[in-house]
């Protein structure tokens, strides 16, 4: 496996090998088709939700074309709070309505880490960058990790069409575009 920095990109005028060009064309064609299918699926999901309404149980086991199905349906309610307004209105009582939010903990990792240190052995997970730093600092030795970890490699690929900023408001499906205006569709390989 090679890292990004160890491989030089070919010059822009270097012809692309046909094997890569053919695979990229098909990949981009599939991206467009997946997007179309996902949009159609969302429309059908909406149609089914309306059709099922309250007339069918939340878990329904019909048979369609000799195939048994399990259909789960219902309405999910999401409540979003105006946090700054509530913080101001409730003052010290604001913490009484809060639940742990993993996203906020991640965003504030440096501030939270010292507070969690006493229980880090219960809520933490070893991370490669921290292990490497601890080995470099001499806090732990590499020998202590022999047989205590495994390494896997997963290749990833992301393909998108690069556009000029002025075309950002219009979906572009030409030449293999995915219509997401620079949003990538990723797929793991391996």
Image (cartoon, rainbow, N blue to C red):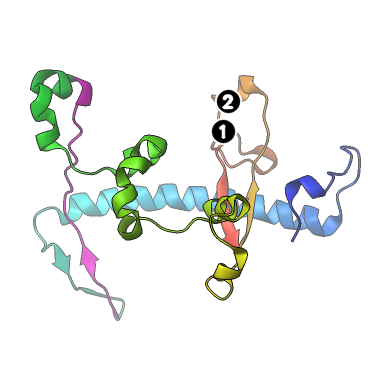
Using the image as rendered, state which of residue 3 and residue 26 is in the foreground. 3
Residue 70 magenta-highlighted: yes
Relative to 67, residue 78 above or below:
above
In this view, the residue in front, 33 or 102, is 102
Q: Is residue 113 visible?
A: yes
Residue 179 position within the rendered picture, expressed as x and y whole percent measured from the top left: 56, 38
Q: Is residue 82 above or below residue 124?
A: above
Q: Nearer the viewer, residue 162 or 35?
A: 162
- Label 2 sits on a secondary structure element that is loop
Residue 168's label in the rendered image is 2
Name the residue carrying label 1.
181
User: Residue placed farthest to the bottom in the image?
Assistant: 66
Q: Earlier in the sequence, mark 2 or mark 1?
A: 2
Q: Quadrant of residue 187?
A: bottom right
- The answer to whether any part of residue 153 appears in the image is no
User: Percent x, y for residue 85?
Assistant: 17, 19
Q: State which region is magenta.
A: 67-84
Percent coordinates x, y for residue 68 in the rendering: 27, 78
Is 177 above or below relative to 119? Answer: above
Number of residues whose C-alpha sits closer than 10 Å to that of mark 1, classed few (under 14), some (14–19) or many (20 or more): some
Query: Is residue 181 in the magenta section?
Result: no
Q: Nearer the viewer, residue 163 or 109?
A: 109
User: Residue 33 location in percent, x, y?
Assistant: 55, 52
Drawn side of residue 76 relative to residue 121, left or right? left
| Label 1 secondary element | loop
Gap in Å between the C-alphas at discs 2 and 1?
6 Å
- Residue beneath the point at 16% across and 38% down: 98
For residue 136, the mark is none
The part of the image, by quadrant, that contains residue 11 is top right
- Looking at the image, which residue is at 72% across and 52% down? 24
Q: Tell whether label 1 touches label 2 (CB within 8 Å).
A: yes
Q: Which corner quadrant holds the N terminus?
A: bottom right
């Amino acid at each position: 496996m090679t890292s990004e920095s160890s491989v030089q990109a070919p010059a822009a005028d270097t012809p692309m090998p046909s094997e890569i060009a053919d695979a990229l064309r098909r990949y981009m064609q599939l991206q467009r088709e997946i997007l179309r299918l996902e949009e159609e699926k969302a429309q059908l999901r909406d149609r089914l939700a309306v059709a099922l309404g309250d007339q069918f149980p939340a878990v329904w086991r019909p048979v369609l074309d000799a195939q048994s199905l399990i259909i789960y349906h219902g309405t999910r309610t999401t409540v979003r709070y105006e946090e700054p307004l509530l913080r101001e209105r409730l003052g010290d009582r604001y913490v009484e309505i809060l639940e742990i939010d993993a996203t906020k903990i991640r965003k504030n990792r440096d501030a939270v880490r010292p507070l969690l240190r006493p229980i880090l052995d219960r809520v933490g997970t070893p991370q490669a960058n921290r292990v490497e730093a601890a080995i470099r600092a001499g806090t732990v030795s590499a020998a202590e990790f022999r047989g205590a970890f495994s390494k896997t490699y997963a290749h990833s690929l992301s393909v998108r069409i690069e556009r000029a900023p002025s075309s950002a408001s219009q979906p572009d499906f030409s030449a293999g575009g995915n219509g997401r205006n620079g949003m990538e569709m990723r797929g793991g390989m391996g």
